[in-house]
Amino acid sequence: MWFAPQTLSLITTHRCTAACEHCCFGCSPQVDAAIPVARLHALVEETAEVPSLRQVVFTGGECFLLGSHLDDLLRRCSGRGLDTRCVTNGFWAGSPRAAAARVRSLQAAGLRELNFSTGVFHARFVPWQRVLWGAAAAAAAGLGVFINIEAFEGDAFAGDALGSHPMLQPFLADGRVRINRGAWVPNGAERAGCGLAHEEKYLRFRDGGGRTACTCSLQVVSVTPSLDLISCCGLNLEYIPELHIGTVRDRSLGQALAAVPADLLKMWIHVEGPERVLEFLKEKAPDLQLPLESAHICHTCQYLHDDARSRELLLRHGHEVAERILERYLLAAAGHQLAAKL
């Protein structure tokens, strides 16, 4: 297999307790799409058979809607030596006591890390205090905790109140809880561009280093509720057909991964990022328009894939960088595999 992903992201369902207007997958309480529980268990077993895969992420939608099935899946992962992470909006942490009880169950099942998503849109459905209680309980139990606050210029979310709360302060101080304010990203309906006023620090093409390699491309593979296999876990993955690399509807995960053809653009995005790709193309065609308003790497990636001129230039000039990108990619892949063995 020409690539060796390290993480499998299971988008367990598109059902969610929230119905955020910006949701990248269009999730809501009314959506039924989900991976059958039996197939989730089978996918964990298949993950354990792929040597490079070391972690399973349960996300959605809202993966906690699985209830006790989530605990069963975590136990299966733990029994097969796989690290685990859950991504949630924290709806289940209705009080400090409820949060502590749920975390104890997750910890007993083998969960290693808990990620919370919040922000002004989430808070309309899930009060930020639930994220506070859930994060504090998880950190106290020894789990790794990451809180992602979706931010945009002028938003009214109480992020400072969350980050400065006494319940979290000890865990923030020792690194058991991390908080990130990430740029808010519209869903695929607005994929032509951001169209939003973002703080300058979020703009990807700014001077001083907004351009970064993509740590998800080819390192994370996702399975959607329709059992599509996707070479990414990015926010716009449902709207970029080129990221759909196969299916696990009628074949195992290992079989699907083995059938994926080599792809220079995916390697290029992995080692240099989509901004660098577009800047190379602009050197070849100075009149090429760059998405200068892009506030997130996923936005730039979608622009790169959607723009007909960029695609044409890639076909014409991609061979000029193929040797350099392949060498960098293979060196990085070898480093990942060596680190895993150590």
Image (cartoon, rainbow, N blue to C red):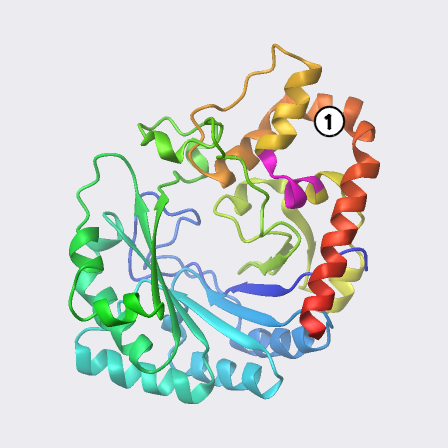
Q: Nearer the viewer, residue 109 or 191?
A: 109
Element under label 1?
helix
- Spot occupied by residue 63 in the image (x, y as percentages of width and height): 41, 68
Identify the residue at horizontal 54%, vertical 41% (top origin): 239
Q: Quadrant of the C terminus?
A: bottom right
Identify the residue at horizontal 29%, vertical 57% (top origin): 18
Q: Is residue 251 visible?
A: no
- Extreme residue toward the top, this view: 287
Q: Nearer the viewer, residue 16 or 280?
A: 280
Image: 295 above or below 234: above
Q: Within 10 Å of the Cα at label 1, are there few (<14), some (14-19), or many (20+) other Cα atoms? A: some
Image: 59 above or below 140: above
Identify the residue at horizontal 21%, vertical 72% (top origin): 133
Q: Which residues are magenta?
A: 268-274
- Spot occupied by residue 312 in the image (x, y as percentages of width and height): 72, 22
Q: In the picture, residue 228 is in which quadrant?
A: bottom right
**Is 33 included in the stretch rendered in magenta?**
no
The residue carrying mark 1 is: 314
Q: Is residue 52 left or right of residue 258?
A: left
* Amino acid on which the number 1 mark rests in the picture: Leu
Q: Quadrant of the N terminus?
A: bottom right
- Spot occupied by residue 135 in the image (x, y as percentages of width and height): 29, 70
Q: Is residue 120 visible?
A: yes
Image: 318 above or below 9: above
Image: 326 above or below 336: above
Q: Is residue 341 left or right of residue 167?
A: right
**Is 270 included in the stretch rendered in magenta?**
yes
Q: Main secondary structure of the magenta part?
A: helix
- Spot occupied by residue 180 in the image (x, y as percentages of width and height): 35, 53
